Structures are given as structure tokens and as C-alpha cells.
Image: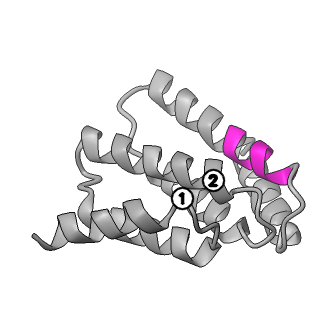
Amino acid sequence: DYASSVERIFQRCLLPNPDVDLWGTYLGYMKVVKDTTSADGERELNEAYEFVLEHVGVDIAAAPLWLDYVDFLKTRRTKSDYEEGNKVTMIRNAFQRCIVLPLDQMERVWRDYDEWENSLNR
């Protein structure tokens, strides 16, 4: 089975290799195989993002991973004001976890964060 072979390769290669591009490839794979139209698929993809950011989120080249995570969070569907409030909190937390790190592309991160926060007040 193709998917299980790919997952075995990732299991062997990810943890010992802190290469941001490899971890980004893993996220790309997860986006393809997880059905984000279901709550379980959305949760599993969120867990994959958290796993990646826990391991390589502090890398100087990790800004695209953080911004991709924020974009993923922005697209999450909500069914109530409560869920929408949780979504806003998750997005804000992701931005705030990112902006304290010494990353390349920090100007872009700050600009995106500022634009997003200002869009909430309109």
C-alpha cells in the first residue's frame, strides 16, 4: 500500500532530520491524504501542524510553515459563535507563538498578523 509505505519513510526520516523542507513535504502529504471536510480529518491535520511546529518551528526558515498553519486555521469551518471565538483564539495564539521567534520573513509575519487583527475590528 502506497500510503503506508510513505508513512513508514516519514516515520524513519522526520525525527532525526530537522530539515524544514522535509517537514514541509510531510505537511503537504498530510494535506493530500487527510479529508479536511470531516472533523476527524481536520483534527488530524491540525495535530500534524502542531507536531511539525513543535519539532522545527524554531528553525530560522520556518516562517512559511507558521503562515501555512495560520492559513489552515483561517479556513476551518465553524458552526457557532463559540466555535468562531475559539478559531480566532487559535489563530491569534499561532501568530503570537510565531512572532517571538527569530525567523526569516518576520516582516511578512508581522504584516499578516497586523492585517488579520485589524480585519477583526471592522
Q: Percent from the top left, x then y, of residue 115?
A: 77, 58
Q: Secondary structure at mark 1?
A: loop
Left or right: where does residue 62 sit relative to residue 52?
A: right
Q: Percent from the top left, x then y, of residue 120?
A: 70, 43
- Disc 2 residue type (three-letter): His
Q: Residue furthest left?
A: 1
Q: Which mark is residue 55?
A: 2
For the magenta stretch, what is the residue range?
A: 93-99
Which image quadrant is residue 71 in?
Answer: bottom right
Q: Which mark is residue 15?
A: 1
Secondary structure mostly taken by the magenta-highlighted segment of the chain: helix
Q: Is residue 119 above or below residue 107?
A: above
- Disc 1 residue type (three-letter): Leu
Residue at 83 percent of width and 64 percent of height: 111
Q: Quadrant of the N terminus?
A: bottom left
Left or right: where does residue 6 sit relative to residue 119?
A: left
